[in-house]
Image (tube, helix red, strand yellow):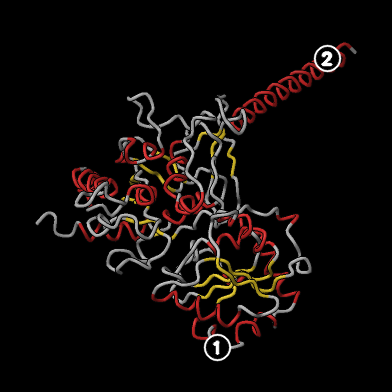
Amino acid sequence: MSFFIEKSMLASRFLFCLIAISILVLIVSSLSLVQFADNSFIVNTNNSSLYSTSCVESKIPFSSISNSRGYICDTKQALLRVYMYDLPPEFHFGLLGWKGNGKEMWPNVDIQGHIPSYPGALNLQHSVEYWLTLDLLSSNITRPCTAIRVKNSSEADVVFVPFFSSLSYNRHSRPPRKGKVSLNGILQDKVVEFLRSRHEWKINGGVNHVIVAHHPNSMLVARKKLSSAMFVLADFGRYRTKIANIEKDVIAPYKHIVRTLDANNSPSFEQRHILVYFQGAIYRKSGGTIRQVLYNLLKNERDVHFTFGSVKSNGVREAGRGMASSKFCLNIVGDTPSSNRLFDAISSHCIPVIISDDIELPFEDVLDYSKFCIFIRSSYAVRKGYLLNFLRGIKEDQWIKMWKRLKEFTKHFEYQYPSQPNDAVDMIWQAIARKLSFMQLKAHRHNRYRTS
């Protein structure tokens, strides 16, 4: 009898030990799993293959304008690693009146109220270099991780030149007196001298350098000397093909100057009582003479607003109201193939009608403009009755489909600080990243005969 009791007790002890060991193993496994998950949490801001922006979440708190949680971008995961030259303030924020304390190279853009403001009106439409520079300076702001600033040029994919060339042209292109060189010309000469002296430029002839020259008249003195670099431009209207072309350069959107409509409160088809809208300069040079032809054809039509206009006397506000009340907004070639009017129309959710045969559009390798714009050849547009008959033939359901798509795409043309995923700043960095393979090709060809 005692034999069976002792055997039963041994079985019970064995079962107890087995359960205890199993619980211990389970606890250890759970702790390991939690630690692994904590160390490998990846935040992917968008799963779309079109937008490659990923950040690694950091638990280190820091001061931020937008929120108290910080996201430190992982250099290895960034789409584009950018080295930015520390040019003196006279080339960038000094042009905005910023002086610092005499020793500072850059304003502290991570602190609200320390960011120098950019002049408004027509100056603002070419402010691309301002927004890109702010984005690179923002180390402690929650922002997309598409482009990361690196401190060592050997780690960089591209080298960014922070010269506010459009502002320099707008503010300082006139010589102080006859026979003297303008400040704009002096600054361009200094940029050329600086770049040609740099090791980073000499390595491959400046192929991996990024220079913003968005105003069509900016960098007139220097553009030929620096043509091996990648330019960020509004269009190619005033450039020879050898200096600027779609293979090596990037087209960036203008900064619109009318306010962006709320997508949920955008006037509908019935609420837009004007069929066709155009307000701006009508008498232009060379290719822009088509504006005068269209003005004479359309000026007396009943549901058409086609008139002179400027930014003066509330012109911007009037243009914003007019576009928001119109179904179609004309974007007609002027002195150059492009204008800010296209992006004002987009922000007003007015279907753009593009009459500019040689226009280049931002990010067209990833955006299909035919989904939310109408393209009409200049030779067709000037035929009497053609333009209005075509637009009046577009049914309400067709217009609504384009209008809905337009509202979805508006975000890609918004400049802001801090930048947001797939806004204008982020899209420009993505476009530059897509040029890297062409940069490598040029760099390798440049190196063919270096050893010999």
Mark 1, residue position: 383
**10 Å neighbourhood of mark 2: few (<14), some, or many (≥20)?**
few
Distance from label 2 to label 1 (Cα)?
A: 105 Å
* Residue 255 vertical position relative to residue 327 in the rendered view, above or below: above
- Kindly identify the amino acid type of the residue bearing the numbered disc 1: Arg
Q: Position of residue 220 (x, y in %)?
A: 29, 58
Q: Earlier in the sequence, mark 2 or mark 1?
A: 2
Where residue 90 sits: x, y (%)?
32, 38
Residue at left offset 50%, top offset 65%: 364
**Residue 426 visible to an observer of this rendering:** no
Residue 447: percent from the left, percent from the top?
19, 56
**Residue at the (49%, 81%) spot, across then down:** 378
What type is the residue that disc 2 sits on?
Met
- Compared across the picture, whether 34 is left or right of 97 comes to right
Position above or below: 64 against 79: above
**In this figure, which residue is indicated by the disc labeled 2?**
9
